[in-house]
Image: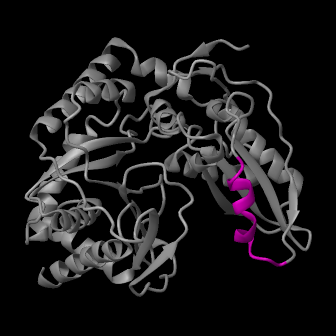
Amino acid sequence: MSVAGPLSLGQLSVWDDIRDLPGARWHEANNAVLWALPHNVGTEEVRTALRSVVARHPSLRTRYDLQDSDPPRQLAPDTDFSDSLPVVETAGAPPGDFVAGPASLRFRLGHEHGWRATLLTRAGTASHLLFVKHHIAADAWAQEVLRQEFTGALTDPSGAGPATAPGPAELAADQFTPAGLRRQTAALGHWNRLLDQAPPTALPPATGAGGGVLQATLRSGPARAAARTVAAAAEVSVSSVVLAAYARSVARICGTDALLVQLMSANRFSPRWKNVVTSMNQWVPALIEGAREDDLRRLASVTHWSSLGAFRHGAHDVTAVAALLARRPDAPEPVCAFNYVTLPEQQPPDSAGKSAPVTEPVITWEEPFTSIGPRCYARAEESASGLSVRLTAKDVGREQCAELLWDMHHALLSTAGAC
């Protein structure tokens, strides 16, 4: 067996989410994407490009020693790996029809690497690469790094970059140096302070048949334009504006003026680790004061600075946080969670060639792929056609979910109209 080392803080967070799940739910930590291929690309070209990317990133060649689950350890990256590439003929069916099966297959992390790929063809011509990965191997940012390198390697053998990039083992070593341990101590202090300050607040439970896990996505072109207008007026980021609108809607449902929120921190603030392929996302708490503020611009400013303070402490040891919470059984829990997704080195939506059709405001209901994560979790993302906010909620009624999303939407548009 290869020499084993500790998990990085991001890997440890993923493990903490999945360690107690029954085997039938382990696939919920997977993510699947379709990468469109250029015309006239052959199977061998795809395999060669994929192999060059996998060879570069240790996370894609890492298995885990799971004999001790508290915590497991990562093995040294394998030098060899399978470059088999199953080919599936779509026969004209939409490529999306072929995602569910591979995405629902669990990864045996002790025996296999945390990714798999399938080449989709149409009438014998390669059209898409279906790439499925476990979250412990790569988060959303890292996934985009992989896509860009894979696309570059299809046309230029050197497009994937140098032979080997830093991986999660090097990151873990850095995080457990004396300087890294001091940062972890400071992060734990951040948690402790907020637990002292936050009031005990919770969303009211669903009534009747409204329980279980619900997922709804608000898509709106006008909301994107409004968020940008308010961000410019308040001199803060678009993400702070969307978070402020979301937090205000939650606070009004809860009837509270101080809202403890979990924020997803990408933790990619150091140039050395910015594009490392692994999972670095971690939840970190932020306390938003005056969360029912009528003036969304003012609330966006408060939210902005509270978020920045939280992100400074985004990298933390979840086992140490769990121990802290065990010593404080009456500590308040975060009411909701928020993630504003950003990806590396993409063109801003307004400069991406032709303007995309503006999405008319609509809420769609979906079957959730996973219920891992906080009870009320909003994932926001901006595109050329609009703003999307996906809300995944447990034991929160359908009407309440829709009310929350529409109230947030109204806050953005009405505030922008007054700017």
Q: Quadrant of residue 245?
A: bottom left
**Is residue 116 something that shows in the picture?**
yes
Q: Depth check: give the residue in front, 106 or 240.
A: 106
In the picture as drawn, the residue positioned furthest to the front comes out as 208
Q: Furthest-right residue in view?
A: 124
Image quarter of the N terminus: top right
Is 97 inside the magenta-drawn segment? yes
Image side of residue 107 versus residue 247, left or right: right
Residue 246 appears in which quarter of the rendering?
bottom left
98 in the magenta segment: yes
Q: Between residues 240 and 270, which one lies in front from this camera angle? A: 240
Direction from residue 278 to residue 151 in the image, left or right: right
Side of 225 where 13 appears, left or right: right
Query: What x and y, as percent, mark residue 221?
Result: 38, 81
* Extent of the magenta region: 92-105
Q: Residue 59: horizontal and vertical position, in percent?
A: 62, 33
Coloration of the structure image: one colour
Q: Is residue 156 visible?
A: no
How far across and down, in percent of the image, does residue 93 sit?
79, 77
- Number of marks drawn: 0
Which of the two residues, 350 or 301, is positioned nearer the viewer here? 301
Q: Residue at x 84, y 52 (%)?
A: 45
Task: Please tell me which residue is depicted at 51% across the width and 33% down the height of the picture.
Answer: 15
Coordinates of residue 142 in the picture (x, y in percent): 54, 45
Which residue occupies the foreground of this view, 288 or 50?
Answer: 288
Q: Residue at coordinates 29% horizontally, 48% vertically from top-left?
A: 262
Q: For the C terminus, give its image quadrant.
A: bottom left
Quadrant of residue 212 in the image?
Answer: bottom left
Please state if 105 lies on the left or on the right of 9 as rendered. Answer: right
